Image: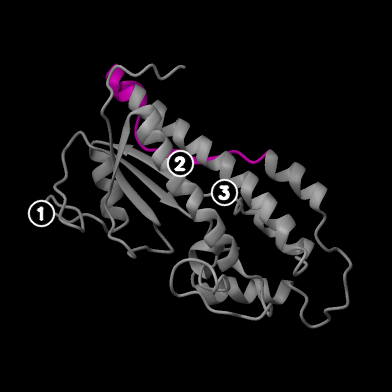
Amino acid sequence: MKFRTPGQLESYFKEEEGFGNPNDREGWFSLSDYAEKIKKLPANIDVRGNPYKLVEEGKKHIQLLERFCNDLSDQFRNTFFSLIEEYKERKEIPQKIIDFLEKKNLTLPKFTIAHGRHAKELLIDIELYDESGESEEGDEYVDNDFVLVFQLPTHLARLWWKGGANDWGEGGVDINDTFIEWGFFYRKLMPIVWEKLGEFENEYGIDFRRINDIGQHDPEKYYYAWYTDVWDKDYDYDK
């Protein structure tokens, strides 16, 4: 099942939330079962090209980016699980919704790592590059650049504005518990990304240079895109 518009995804969730009969609790979310399932989900990491053909420095760069993606995925997963537990005190979540999220692997973000011409092709695909040799924001593309793209799970990327109106940021709409407040999850999960960026910049010597502008996101293609560089070339990646 593929959803081409936010409305199609929203319609699916709304149909499966059981609002037609709110007293029917058969098949509602089991916390312990879900916890075991999401722990087994692998990180969504797509490495474009063949990293084994890179020089040793490039291989280590890819290795460090993969570590970042895995660490962020683990923390994202654990926090999402905790938020489900917290949110269920306000509103139950039907098992059909949980099964759908698990089946589509929508509890974890997606990452794409690319280098060189693969990075250029990736930026063209997500419309952050033009043939003038510059990114959408005017940064000049270099042939040996590394690019990392981060995308939220589909329901968070498209329905981030539903709920969470009292938390940080603009655009959140108070929906008065008539729908699962994916905006609540979005606003609790995004600080994890910023903290992990700071951790890897300070402790692992990697620089993230954002390509898309503040507030510029595409729910179909990316939430963040970065050029990356390692300023500590002698860092021991295996420690």
Q: Residues within 10 Å of mark 3 (few under 14, many from 20)?
A: many
Q: Residue at x 23, y 39 (%)?
A: 117
For the residues labelled 1 and 3, say whether their Cβ atoms are less than 8 Å apart: no
Q: Residues within 10 Å of mark 1 (few under 14, many from 20)?
A: few
Q: Position of residue 45 (x, y in %)?
A: 48, 40
The colour style of the image is one colour
Per the model, the C-alpha gap separating discs 1 and 3 is 34 Å
> Which labelled disc corresponds to residue 44?
none
Q: Amino acid at mark 2?
A: Lys
> Which labelled disc corresponds to residue 132?
1
> Which labelled disc corresponds to residue 196?
2
Front residue of 15/109: it is: 109
Q: Position of residue 125 (x, y in %)?
A: 31, 54
Q: Residue at x 66, y 71 (%)?
A: 180
Element carrying mark 1: loop
Q: Amino acid at mark 3?
A: Leu
Query: Which residue, given by chain and number where applicable, does mark 3 sit on?
Result: 108
Q: Is any part of residue 121 visible from this angle?
A: yes
Choose top left, top right, bottom left or bottom right for residue 169: bottom left
